């Protein structure tokens, strides 16, 4: 039986067992007794933002086409004789994969046949098969996906916002790339990126369900430790220096919509760290945004009563080590007035300070939501590695939320909501119109 280290949360009464295999792969498992369904996720620290890198000890950096991490995710699912999805389906398992700006993940869920599906997951991700023919075939499939995104008004509103907010950081680029960038991808470039980012030392396997963590470690070791993966690359990820200023205050695009769609928000320049400090910021911002614009907030209800928003209005925060922002989005007949009213509401909120009773009610509501989330294996499966790759522990979220103070949250509000760092993206009824300022 493989020895594993334990991370415990007394509040959640949960523990995560961790070990590292000889090949370098980190393995983690959360044992949820009595659950029928099981999830396994194998992920790599490689996302759409990793288009420029250098192997330390070499002279020149490597630049790769936009969208290649997403392309690589697609290609790994294809075998010489068919699709990996068919193998999982034959086992009664659901399979999926995703690419975001910083990671790529492959997962399956099932009730029965967990171990055969587990072996399949480790095997296909660690055994790439690219050919000139199947790479060219995939280009057409991804081009269709890109065109679907181009035809999605909601997608274009968010995309316009990110391009306005950031001048150089690759978070402003489409995860799937562009048609031109996808057409430039070759089999050789795919193998180069695979060898660089898919070494086991850059990856983590996570399992949640009624499965013994020791068995997970032993089975993963049996599957992989006999394989030759070579020396782990000494990888340096290269990012352009992002200016403090936003790229544009406003972007517009005309599309076939019945009413305008607006996405707007603030660039956070307090970056350069991860781990517990980043986790405190993420949870503090969640509490803050619920207080400011959640559905029980005074601002939300005033906007709704005045007809400036409908049920589509929402907010989100996205934080990584080297970028961060808070945004609002939804449909509105008067997007300019909506942006103005939200900005006024934020100014009044910051100037008036945080009401201690409202803060405590909101924090308790957020903690309650966190506690309920740990009854969902799907939530745990999709979020564990997102936290893990930021050097944070998902099972510590409740403890952190309980320790956040009103003063801390007020400080976040005072620092973030700078009018000079506000970008607005609007999709308007029409066609072909696109501009920024």
Image (cartoon, rainbow, N blue to C red):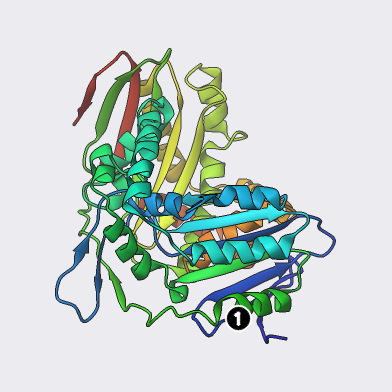
| Residue under the image location 32 percent in, 55 percent down | 49
| Residue under the image location 38 percent in, 57 percent down | 130
Q: Is residue 161 above or below residue 400?
A: above
Say whether residue 346 is left or right of residue 418: right
- 131 or 357, nearer to the observer: 131
| Relative image position of residue 255 (x, y in whole percent) | 34, 18
Say whether residue 50 is left or right of residue 309: left
Q: Is residue 132 above or below residue 148?
A: below
Query: Hey, which quadrant is residue 45 in on the image?
Result: bottom left
Query: Hey, which quadrant is residue 381 in on the image?
Result: bottom right
Around disc 1, counting alpha carbons within 10 Å, would you say few (fewer than 14), some (14 to 19), or many (20 or more)? Answer: many
| Residue under the image location 24 percent in, 35 percent down | 249
- 205 or 193, nearer to the observer: 193
- Extreme-right residue of the structure: 34
Q: Is residue 277 visible?
A: yes
Q: Is residue 395 above or below residue 339?
A: below
| Residue under the image location 73 percent in, 86 percent down | 1
Dot 1: what SS? Answer: strand
Q: Is residue 173 above or below residue 407?
A: above
Say whether residue 384 is left or right of residue 183: right
Read off the residue under disc 1. Answer: 19
- 299 or 33, nearer to the observer: 33
Q: Is residue 366 visible?
A: no
| Relative image position of residue 38 (x, y in whole percent) | 72, 58
| Relative image position of residue 76 (x, y in whole percent) | 46, 55
| Relative image position of residue 120 (x, y in whole percent) | 61, 62
- Extreme-left residue of the structure: 59
């Amino acid at each position: 039986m493989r020895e594993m280290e334990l991370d415990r949360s007394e509040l959640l009464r949960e523990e995560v067992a961790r070990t590292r295999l000889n090949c370098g792969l980190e393995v983690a498992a959360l044992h949820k007794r009595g659950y029928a369904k099981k999830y396994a996720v194998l992920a790599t620290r490689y996302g759409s933002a990793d288009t420029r890198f250098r192997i330390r000890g070499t002279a020149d950096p490597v630049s790769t086409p936009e969208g290649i991490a997403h392309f690589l995710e697609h290609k790994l699912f294809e075998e010489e004789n068919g699709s990996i999805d068919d193998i999982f389906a034959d086992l009664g398992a659901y399979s999926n994969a995703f690419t975001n700006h910083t990671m790529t993940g492959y997962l399956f869920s099932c009730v029965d046949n967990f171990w055969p599906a587990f072996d399949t997951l480790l095997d296909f991700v660690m055994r790439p098969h690219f050919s000139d023919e199947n790479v060219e075939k995939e280009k057409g499939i991804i081009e269709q996906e890109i065109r679907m995104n181009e035809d999605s008004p909601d997608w274009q509103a968010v995309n316009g916002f990110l391009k306005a907010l950031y001048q150089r950081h690759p978070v402003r680029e489409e995860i799937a790339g562009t048609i031109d960038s996808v057409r430039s991808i070759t089999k050789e470039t795919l193998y180069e990126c695979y060898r660089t980012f898919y070494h086991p030392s850059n990856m983590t396997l996570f399992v949640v369900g009624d499965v013994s963590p020791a068995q997970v470690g032993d089975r993963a070791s049996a599957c992989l430790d006999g394989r030759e993966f070579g020396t782990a690359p000494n990888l340096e990820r290269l990012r352009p220096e992002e200016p403090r200023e936003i790229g544009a205050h406003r972007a517009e695009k005309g599309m076939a919509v019945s009413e305008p769609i607006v996405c707007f928000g603030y660039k956070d320049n307090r970056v350069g760290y991860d781990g517990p400090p980043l986790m405190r910021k993420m949870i503090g911002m969640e509490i803050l945004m619920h207080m400011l614009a959640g559905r029980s907030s005074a601002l939300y209800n005033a906007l709704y009563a005045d007809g400036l928003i409908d049920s589509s209005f929402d907010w989100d925060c996205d934080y990584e080590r080297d970028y961060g922002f808070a945004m609002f989005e939804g449909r509105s007949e008067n997007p300019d007035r909506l942006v103005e009213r939200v900005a006024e509401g934020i100014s009044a909120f910051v100037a008036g300070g945080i009401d201690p009773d409202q803060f405590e009610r909101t924090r308790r509501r957020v903690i309650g939501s966190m506690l309920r989330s740990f009854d969902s294996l799907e939530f745990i499966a999709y979020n564990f590695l997102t936290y893990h790759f930021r050097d944070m522990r998902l099972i510590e979220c409740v403890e952190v939320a309980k320790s956040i103070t009103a003063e801390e949250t007020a400080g976040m509000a005072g620092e973030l909501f700078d009018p000079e760092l506000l970008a607005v993206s609007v999709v308007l009824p029409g066609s072909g119109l696109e501009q920024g300022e």
